[in-house]
Image (tube, helix red, strand yellow):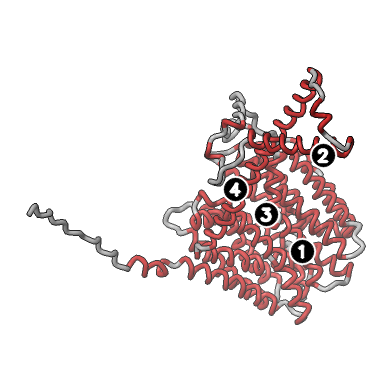
Amino acid sequence: MELKKSPDGGWGWVIVLVSFLTQFLCYGSPLAVGVLYIEWLDAFGEGKGKTAWVGSLASGVGLLASPVCSLCVSSFGARPVTIFSGFMVAGGLMLSSFAPNIYFLFFSYGIVVGLGCGLLYTATVTITCQYFDSRRGLALGLISTGSSVGLFIYAALQKMLIEFYGLDGCLLIVGALALNILACGSLMRPLQFSDCPLSEKPPLENLPDKYSIYDDKEKNPEENINILDKSYCSEEKCKNVLANGHWKQESLLQKTPATIAQAKEPETYKQKVAEQTYFCKQLAKRKWQLYKNYCGETLALFKNKVFSALFIAILLFDIGGFPPSLLMEDVARSSNVKEEESLMPLISIIGIMTAVGKLLLGILADFKWINTLYLYVATLIMMGLALCAIPFAKSYVTLAILSAVVGFLTGNWSIFPYVTTKTVGIEKLAHAYGILMFFAGLGNSLGPPIVGWFYDWTQTYDIAFYFSGFCVLLGGFILLLAALPSWDACKKQLPKPAPTTFLYKVASNV
């Protein structure tokens, strides 16, 4: 069975709508967790570094578990995974309202909600790619803005719910809103299969040689049957010796038709066992060969200096660039900014500008005269400078401006797949992107706690944001140095070796 051709429209636009709403509902609270972060600091009295683990786990666990999420979606389909993950996200949010301490939040909000968000992201992207081919970029761009719009709305929504119903009531209501993911998942109708008939499975003995992984000669089913026959006969002899003390009398008994019929049954069973054993051995060796190939391809990727610099850059970017979306509200409170001056939550500003950055940077990446890799490096360098400027902001206006700049530059996530494709090629994109997302999740998990520990150590965010800006700047300059064409100039300037000429002389007949 094969999937039908992508319709590039029709029900696919319903898939885009429900995928947008799914990312809006699941990522709204985890991305706007900075509003909850302040309440958890007051409720549990823990340090900023320890409390920051809750939000960092919610954002990082889904990326760290991306291989498992992909396996679940490919095995069960997008619709069942979406419905199951909707229960996970809603249940984790509701459980968090009953948290007696910060460690319970590590599990309920950090792991359960984070893993549910990772599953939902993979499911929405997978089913959207199935429904769209020529318009796939537009469809993926539309659904990716769901998380940014969720950050913008949930920051103000959670702040208002806390004022009216308290922290526990806010989490219960947000969890109830997440149950709408179940309705979105029910509309994710999978593509129907084509009407082509199933191809018959070839018999085991007619398998072509290409399925043989190793060059050594394998035992065929007939040889396996002979081995089983020998073991079966020896087993029967042992049983007769143990039971009667001798076996010669059994061999003298005359064989009847009933005994012959009974003898055929174990032969059929032995043949099936031999065939299954042969198949399992081949399957195990194929899996082992695939594993070896995967490790070899991974090592080959890291031999590419630009890819190695890219994974360092994305790790440092998430360590330094993710904390502002979590800690900016607490930065404003530490700078003695009054709530009356706040026209809009700073996290909401980051969210709406992230959506704008995704769209504008994605449009810029489509221009042929713009080098996407250098555009990504420019966003990293400007992001690092903006983070270093945050300690100098002491008013709501300056913090709002810097939040807008940081949010816009965070939209470089939209051009990251372009950069990865330019670095490794389209044929290795899936493999390379999975590795990079793992390191991005690692950076998301480590960044906020590190910044929080700096505050616990110095009682100010100044050194913390200097550290964040330095990390992003370092990643940007490492990627810039690796991508400069001057590194390959020496190879291009090397003179090509002159071809060796041979003179042939006709042998003399003398």
Q: Earlier in the sequence, mark 2 or mark 3?
A: 3
Label 1 near label 2: C-beta < 8 Å? no
Label 2 near label 4: C-beta < 8 Å? no
What element does badge 1 sit on? helix
What element does badge 4 sit on? helix
Instruction: Kindly identify the amino acid type of the residue bearing the numbered disc 3.
Output: Ser
Disc 4 residue crowd, few under 14, some 14–19, many 20+, Cα 10 Å: some
Q: Which residue is mark 2?
A: 238
On the question of residue 414 being in view, the answer is no
Q: Which residue is mark 1?
A: 34
- The residue that appears at 84% across and 56% down in the rendered structure is 108
Q: Which residue is mark 3?
A: 148
Give the spatial CA distance, label 2 vs label 3: 73 Å
Disc 1 residue crowd, few under 14, some 14–19, many 20+, Cα 10 Å: many
Label 1 near label 4: C-beta < 8 Å? no
Q: Nearer the viewer, residue 91 or 336?
A: 91
Instruction: Kindly identify the amino acid type of the residue bearing the numbered disc 4.
Output: Gly
Left or right, residue 470 beside residue 97: left
From the image, which quarter does the N terminus lie in? top right
Q: Earlier in the sequence, mark 4 or mark 2?
A: 4
Q: Residue 275, position in %: x, y?
A: 67, 34
Q: Quadrant of residue 500?
A: bottom left
Q: Residue 431, position in %: x, y?
A: 58, 52
Q: Nearer the viewer, mark 4 or mark 2?
A: 2
Disc 3 residue crowd, few under 14, some 14–19, many 20+, Cα 10 Å: many
